[in-house]
Image (cartoon, rainbow, N blue to C red):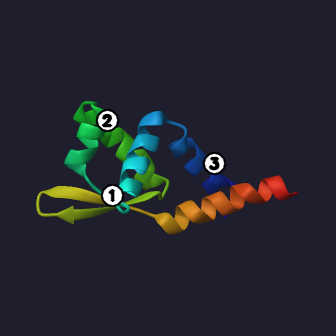
Amino acid sequence: MELKQLEKIAKALGDINRLKILKDMAINGGFIQCSQIVSVLDLAQPSVSHHIKTLTEAGLIEREKEGRSYSYILNKTLLKEYVKNIAAFAEK
């Protein structure tokens, strides 16, 4: 994994609201619907959309359209790879 991608993921993880989204997704088997995110964060829709966009651009979640709404899937593979790469820093 390139340093630029590590940086993008680290920045995405650097916000409490985005961490709450990921935590809730993990609790729900790596899946969450957009309406759930609004209730988890207790934020206005534009703020939630910003956080979702950041997580999506970092590759941490993937969007799936279901009719008129969206659901999101946690990219566990990328998250595990990120953790592995960060852990490698401690081994050197």
Task: Write the residue at 27% across / 31% down.
Answer: 42
Badge 1 element: loop
Q: Amino acid at mark 1?
A: Asn
Q: Which residue is mark 3?
A: 7
Residue 25: name its quadrant.
Answer: bottom left
Q: Amino acid at mark 2?
A: Leu
Residue 85: name its quadrant.
Answer: bottom right
* Real-space Cα separation, disc 3 to disc 1, in angstroms: 27 Å
Q: Where residue 67 sits: x, y (%)?
A: 11, 63
Task: Write the residue at 62% across / 59% down.
Answer: 82
- Mark 2 Cα-neighbour bin, 10 Å: few <14, some 14–19, many ≥20: some
Which of labels 3 and 1 is toward the front?
A: 1
Q: What numbered label is drawn on residue 41?
A: 2
Residue 47: name its quadrant.
Answer: top left
Q: Amino acid at mark 3?
A: Glu
Q: Where residue 16 sits: x, y (%)?
A: 47, 35
- Mark 1 Cα-neighbour bin, 10 Å: few <14, some 14–19, many ≥20: few
Q: Which residue is mark 1?
A: 28
Task: Write the residue at 41% across / 36% down.
Answer: 17
In terms of sequence position, does the residue under pointer 3 or pointer 1 come before the other? 3
